């Protein structure tokens, strides 16, 4: 395995020239090059080590710690994933227009509406998990409640057009595989 350089190490890269390592993760170096400015390069890239700093290196980046924490929270606390809206709807709006012309219309940003739909989906998932994990409910009660939740998902399939990824859409009774 190649040596992990510490912050302050000096290198000579075949493409970027001479530079100093200013940040390190397990996979990347942030290097400030004399002629090319700040660049990120893989720790496995070919370059000449001019002077290796002897400092101990923390090979876990803040991003990696944050991602791990997010994954743990998502798994154990019903923390919702980031669900992107389809590109064609970004920045759009939804207009609710009453039949009575004397009444005012209501305009809602689609992003706000979509966020509420995703929150509803996430809460249904948490409810589903709690029902399935319940020790107080009889098996038949769990099955009955699960069927209601599946029907709720089915009622929400109208909004699938808003999701960027098909894998994040609602699936009802007819689309269960």
Image (tube, rainbow, N blue to C red):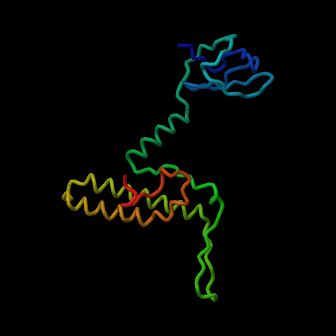
Task: Residue at 49%, 58% (x, y): give it.
Answer: 118
Task: Residue at 37%, 46% (x, y): give it.
Answer: 76
Give residue 131's quadrant in the image: bottom left
In this orientation, does residue 61 appear?
yes
In this orientation, does residue 123 appear?
no
Determine whether 73 is above or below 157 in the image: above
Task: Residue at 27%, 51% (x, y): give it.
Answer: 133
Residue 97 % position (x, y): 60, 79
Residue 45 % position (x, y): 64, 19
Residue 92 % position (x, y): 65, 63
Residue that sits furthest to the right in the current view: 35
Q: Nearer the viewer, residue 33 or 46?
A: 46
Residue 125 % position (x, y): 38, 55
Determine whether 95 is above or below 64 in the image: below
Task: Residue at 30%, 60% (x, y): give it.
Answer: 146
Give residue 54's quadrant in the image: top right
96 relative to 137 in the view: left or right = right
Determine whether 3 is above or below 159 in the image: above
């Amino acid at each position: 395995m190649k040596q992990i350089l510490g912050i302050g190490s000096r290198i000579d890269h075949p493409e970027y020239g001479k530079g100093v390592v200013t940040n390190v993760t397990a996979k990347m170096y942030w290097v400030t090059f004399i002629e090319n400015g700040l660049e990120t390069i893989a720790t496995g890239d070919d370059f000449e080590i001019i002077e290796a700093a002897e400092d101990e290196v923390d090979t876990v980046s803040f991003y990696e710690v944050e991602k791990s924490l997010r994954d743990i929270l998502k798994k154990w606390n019903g923390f919702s994933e980031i669900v992107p809206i389809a590109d064609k709807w970004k920045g759009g709006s939804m207009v609710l227009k009453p039949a009575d012309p004397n009444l005012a219309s209501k305009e809602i940003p689609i992003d706000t509406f979509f966020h509420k739909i995703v929150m509803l989906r996430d809460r249904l998932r948490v409810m589903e998990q709690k029902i399935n994990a319940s020790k107080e409910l009889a098996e038949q009660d769990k099955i009955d409640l699960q069927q209601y939740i599946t029907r709720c998902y089915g009622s929400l399939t109208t909004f699938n057009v808003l999701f960027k990824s098909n894998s994040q859409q609602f699936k009802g009774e007819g689309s269960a595989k």
